[in-house]
Image (tube, grey):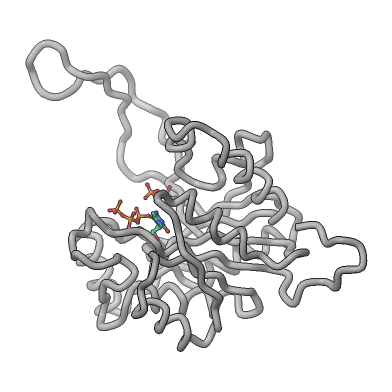
Amino acid sequence: MPTEQGTPPPAHRTAVILVAAGSGTRLGYGIPKALVPLAGRSLLEHALDGLATGCPDARVIVVLPEGNAELEGICSRHRSRPVTCTGGATRNDSVRAGLARLEPGTEFVLVHDAARALTPPAVFERVADALSAGAEAVIPVLPVIDTIKSVQPASAGIGEGIVSSTVDRAVLRAVQTPQGFNAASLAAAHAAVSSWKPERAEKVTDDAMLMEMNGITVFTVHGSALGLKVTTKMDLLLAEALVANGYEDEA
Ligand SMILES: Nc1ccn([C@@H]2O[C@H](COP(=O)(O)OP(=O)(O)OP(=O)(O)O)[C@@H](O)[C@H]2O)c(=O)n1
Ligand SMILES: C[C@](O)(CO)[C@H](O)COP(=O)(O)O
C-alpha cells in the first residue's frame, strides 16, 4: 500500500490476513469452524500458532464471524496479538474486510485460511522469502497424485459421466494457503471485484486467481501435506491422526 507523503512507514512491513469467518457447513459441527477442536485446541489457535512462528514480525489480522465472543477471546489471548474484524458472506468478502485493516505502507500481505490449521511455519517462510526475492504473487502448491479426467455429464442413462480426456497431471498443482502478494496489487485487484456481479465474483476461488486475471505472474513454492484444508469430517479425522502421531513432513 503506498504511503501518503510525510506518512511514517508502517510498524510492520508484512501483514497476515487469517480468514476465519466461515461457517463450516460441510463439517457440520453447528459452530463456526474456527472454534472446532482439533487435538483439544481450536482450529483458530492452531492456525495462529503456525503463522506466529512462521511470520513472527508480521501484523496479524484475523477475520471473524460477527459477534463471536469466544473467537475474539482466543485472539485477544494469543501471542501474535492480532487485530480482529468481521468477515462477509463469502471468502472474498472476508479477505476484503481484512485488507481494509492494513496499515498504510504495508508492503507484503499473506492471506491464510484458518481451515488450514496445521500449515507448518516453514510454508509461511517460503512464501515470505519469495516475496522478499521480488515475487508480486506467490502460492504454496503440491503435485496432484491422482490421475485426473475431464468429464461431461452422461446422457445415456449409464453412470454419472463420460470421460472426454485425461489431463496431463505433470503440469497440475493443488493450491494451498498462505498466498503472498504485494499488498497494493492485491488491494487493487480486490477493489475491482467488489463492483462485479456476484455470479462472476463467485468464480474467483482464491486470491492468486485475481492476480492472474490482472496479468501478474504468480510464482509457486512447495506446500505441505500438513496444509490440508479441514473441510469435511474426514479431513478433521486425518488432521487429528497427524497431530496424534506427531507427523512431520519434509517441510
Ligand atoms: N464467508 C467466509 C467463508 C470462508 N471464510 C474462510 O475461508 C477459509 C476457506 O473456507 P472453507 O474452509 O471452505 O470454510 P467454510 O465457509 O467455513 O466451509 P463451508 O463451505 O463448509 O461452510 C476458511 O478459513 C473460512 O473461515 C471466511 O473467512 N469467510
Ligand atoms: C484459497 C483456497 O484454500 C486454495 O486452495 C481455496 O481456493 C478456498 O476455496 P473454498 O471454496 O473457499 O474452500
Give how far across and how far down residue 143 sits, in percent. 43, 47
In this rendering, position of residue 163 left or right of residue 128: left
The answer to which of 112 and 226 lies nearer the viewer is 112
The answer to which of 117 and 92 lies nearer the viewer is 92
Residue at the extreme front: 67
Q: Residue at x 63, y 47 (%)?
A: 219
Q: Residue at x 38, y 73 (%)?
A: 44
The answer to which of 27 and 248 lies nearer the viewer is 27
Q: Residue at x 63, y 44 (%)?
A: 191
Quarter of the image with the N terminus in it:
bottom right
Give how far across and how far down residue 41 sits, in percent. 30, 81
- 97 w.r.t. 199: above or below: below
Q: How many marks?
A: 0
Give how far across and how far down residue 66 sits, in percent. 39, 66
* Quadrant of the rendered image holding ligand 1: bottom left
In this rendering, position of residue 155 left or right of residue 207: left
Give how far across and how far down residue 88 sits, in percent. 44, 54
In this rendering, position of residue 71 left or right of residue 7: left
- 52 w.r.t. 90: above or below: below
In this rendering, position of residue 92 left or right of residue 164: right
Q: Residue at x 60, y 69 (%)?
A: 125
Residue at the extreme right: 6
Q: Quadrant of residue 214?
A: top right
Residue at the extreme left: 157
